[in-house]
Image: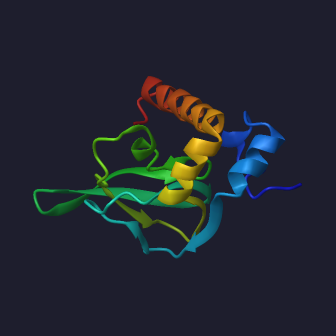
Amino acid sequence: MTSMLDSLDILKLLSQQERDNLAVFCQDRIIQKWETLFSEWDEWNAMYFLKTWKIDIFKNINWEQVKLWQVVAEEVLWEMALFSDTNNKRMATAIAGENSYLVVILDFSMNELKSKQPHVIEKIKQIIEYRNSQNTKYNIV
């Protein structure tokens, strides 16, 4: 079975069966250039895998929108909420820098996935932690 997640290199450490199981909880989404994916202080409601193009991340600092970084294809957006039970608020705003294609896992699906496939969540967490350590190593974050 071909899954919508098969082309995401970030998830290649998952077996085909694990990707297929994870895909059941996912949705495709296209967001247009300049469209806001989420805003600072919004409630967390999803985790995103960016398949194509880019999303710009902004933070309101002294009443000014400051661009912090750019998330590019093959990265994960707002995975921090996956590992934190203390803060369910978005800490920045995400705006499409180009028309972008995302795979979305909504919060209720994430909770179901955690209960039914905890080992998949653990593998995703390990992948994200490794990618974050590489970004820190090269001063990308």
Q: How is the image coloured?
A: rainbow
The location of residue 135, given as percent across then percent down, is 48, 32
Residue name at image x 31 percent, y 55 percent: 90
Of residues 13 and 59, the one nearer the viewer is: 13
Residue name at image x 46 percent, y 45 percent: 79
All told, the count of numbered labels is 0
The location of residue 73, given as percent across then percent down, is 60, 52
Query: Quarter of the image containing the N terminus?
Result: bottom right
Residue name at image x 65 percent, y 38 percent: 120
Query: Quarter of the image containing the C terminus?
Result: top left
Residue ranking furthest to the front: 115
Of residues 16 and 113, the one nearer the viewer is: 113
Of residues 98 and 38, the one nearer the viewer is: 38
Residue ranking furthest to the right: 1
The location of residue 31, given as percent across then percent down, is 53, 73
The location of residue 71, given as percent across then percent down, is 49, 51
Image position of 86 with respect to 3: above or below? above
Q: Is residue 137 left or right of residue 53?
A: left
When asked about the image quadrant of residue 57, the answer is bottom left
Q: Is residue 71 left or right of residue 27?
A: left
Residue ranking furthest to the top: 137
Image position of 104 with respect to 84: above or below? below
Residue name at image x 64 percent, y 33 percent: 119
